[in-house]
Image (cartoon, rainbow, N blue to C red):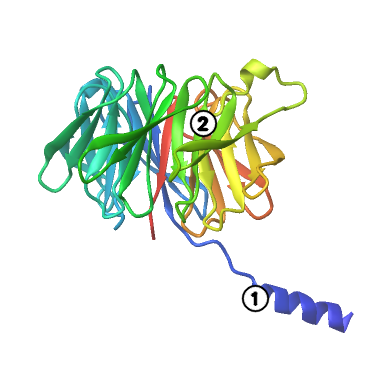
Amino acid sequence: MRGQLAFAALALATATPAAAYTVYVSNERGNSITIIDSETLEVIDTVDVGQRPRGINMSPDGKHLYILASDDDAVQVLDTKTHELVHSLPSGPDPELGVLHPSGNPLYVANEDDNLVTAIDVDAGTIRAEIPVGIEPEGMGISPDGKIMVNTSETTNMAHFIDTETDQIVANVLVDQRPRFAQFTDDGKYLYVSAEIGGTVSVIDPVKHEVIHRIEFNVPGVPKEALQPVGVRVTKDNKKVFVALGPANRVAVVDGETWEVLDYLLVGQRVWQLAFTPDEKQLWTTNGISNDVSVIDVDALTVLKSVQVGEQPWGVAISPN
């Protein structure tokens, strides 16, 4: 008994609790941002913003949240300390998803209505470039070194590789139907592109510009047409890939080496986007129909809690510290 108590005491002493971060959720129909404490899993504030906020991006220093207010044709900038909107940036029409250069500038946004990607200088508050891409651009990803930005076009069914120095397309890769999201691994070895209608995630070699594998999904009792991959996130060690499966209400857990599906985690209704806490202890999901977010314990692969937010949560971003 004494040995068991000693072992328990040692386990408590060496356990590493999850750090506290701030989670930001855009509510597409609620026209608001819900702010949540990742430690207590409680809502701490709700901020009214522009019309139809969708994609949101956190600055590397955590001081600003960039909010793509799609129906206002603008990017609003939230001060994360005061929770106040400080100014807006020009974005082009209907900005949907964005990705920041690793340096924090520029911000690239997909303009769905105009078939453009707009590069925004967030310091100068000006548009640096407008890059023509395929029809209905949405997914946005950037390589770890910041040299290549990738946009996916939903109707053209392509991933467009864009040189960030020249703002020119250098390659196009055909993927499955209606690609929604692009995510590089931290080492830049792979690019994952989800296809909502195709029901797959393409694994792309970003040097050869070739699809080297397609991940497929099968959930017993869920019709194939409901398996609609959208958001994708990869752990820093590349060992696990998490995929939001839309109206299937599941997050798929994929082995990052074999690309076999390991598990399906039941979350809220119409799971859309995903974000890790910086320590990768938690994965947060936005569930657009149940108006909540789910918190996944990454190590245990279990859902810890659902947190009610605003109407139709869409994007999620988390403070770096």
Q: Residue shown at 68%/46% (left/top)? A: 258
Residue closest to the eye, 278 or 160: 160
Amino acid identity at mark 2? Ser
Tell which circle, 1 or 2, labels the residue nearer the N-terminal end. Answer: 1
Horizontal side, residue 84 vs residue 262: left or right: left
The image position of residue 253, as x and y in percent, is 65, 42
Q: Residue shown at 59%/45% (left/top)? A: 241
The residue indicated by pointer 2 is 194
Residue closest to the eye, 176 or 69: 176
Question: Looking at the image, can residue 178 be seen?
Answer: yes
Residue closest to the eye, 203 or 243: 203
The N terminus lies in quadrant: bottom right
Amino acid identity at mark 1? Thr
The image position of residue 272, as x and y in percent, is 50, 30
Horizontal side, residue 74 vs residue 303: left or right: left
Q: Residue shown at 59%/28% (left/top)? A: 200
Question: Disc 1 to disc 2, how far (Cα)?
Answer: 39 Å
Secondary structure of residue under mark 2: strand
Eye-nearest disc, 1 or 2: 2
Horizontal side, residue 294 vs residue 155: left or right: right
Label 1 Cα crowd, 10 Å radius (few <14 / some 14-19 / many 20+): few
Residue, far right: 1
The image position of residue 280, as x and y in percent, is 53, 56
Question: Looking at the image, can residue 231 be seen?
Answer: no
Label 2 Cα crowd, 10 Å radius (few <14 / some 14-19 / many 20+): many
The residue indicated by pointer 1 is 14
The C terminus lies in quadrant: bottom left
In this picture, is 300 found above or below 254?
Answer: below
